[in-house]
Image (spheres, helix red, strand yellow):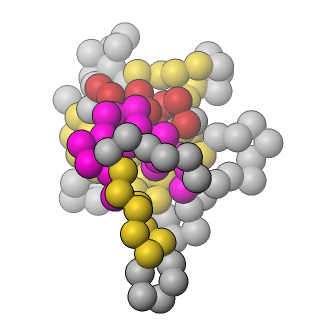
Amino acid sequence: MAAMVGAVSKTRKDGHGTVSMVDPTPAQLGLSYAACMKTDREDGLYTTVVCTRSGEALGLVYSSKESVVAALECGRGVYYSRSRKGLWRKGDTSGHYQTLHRLDLDCDGDALRFTVTQR
């Protein structure tokens, strides 16, 4: 693994390693997060459930590594539009943007959950 600026690597007693990032930029955090994601889709996208803080599902969308980085950089819902073949910044056209609160992976790392507030 390449060394990261501000990263601390440790080996636990069980032999597994951990990496801690100190004050990562949104891009560093997003790329590190994306490195843990996997997909079996031919287009390389990640199935993403968008929900509220109370757990209400708002929709099913797709994310790319670039959209995850963009979402963390701006703190909003940013996804990959399959029809436009590029980033979809929710609300740029409609004004109904989403404030990003949390980003989670499921247990096997092949689906994402964006927790947002719809504005």
Q: Quadrant of residue 95?
A: top left
Task: Tell me what residue is drawn at x 50 percent, y 78 percent.
Answer: 16
Q: How many marks?
A: 0
- Along the line of sight, the residue nearer the viewer: 119 or 18: 18
Does residue 19 belong to the magenta stretch? no
Rendering coords of residue 6 (x, y %): 32, 45
Rendering coords of residue 77 (x, y %): 35, 33
Q: Quadrant of residue 111?
A: bottom right
In the rendered image, the quadrant that contains the C terminus is top left
Task: Tell me what residue is drawn at x 42 percent, y 88 percent.
Answer: 13
**Residue 111 in the figure: left or right of residue 68:** right
The magenta span reads: 20-37
- Along the line of sight, the residue nearer the viewer: 95 or 15: 15
Residue pushed farthest bottom?
14
Rendering coords of residue 105 (x, y %): 46, 59
**Image position of 20 with respect to 62: above or below:** below
Does residue 24 belong to the magenta stretch? yes
**Image position of 114 with respect to 12: above or below:** above
**Residue 43 in the figure: left or right of residue 62:** right
Residue pushed farthest top?
93
Q: Is residue 57 visible?
A: no
Rendering coords of residue 24 (x, y %): 30, 40
- Along the line of sight, the residue nearer the viewer: 32 or 85: 32
**Image position of 31 with respect to 75: above or below:** below
Residue pushed farthest right?
42
Task: Tell me what residue is drawn at x 47 percent, y 88 percent.
Answer: 14
Task: Tell me what residue is drawn at x 55 percent, y 37 percent.
Answer: 65
**Residue 106 in the figure: left or right of residue 22:** right
Q: Is residue 46 visible?
A: yes
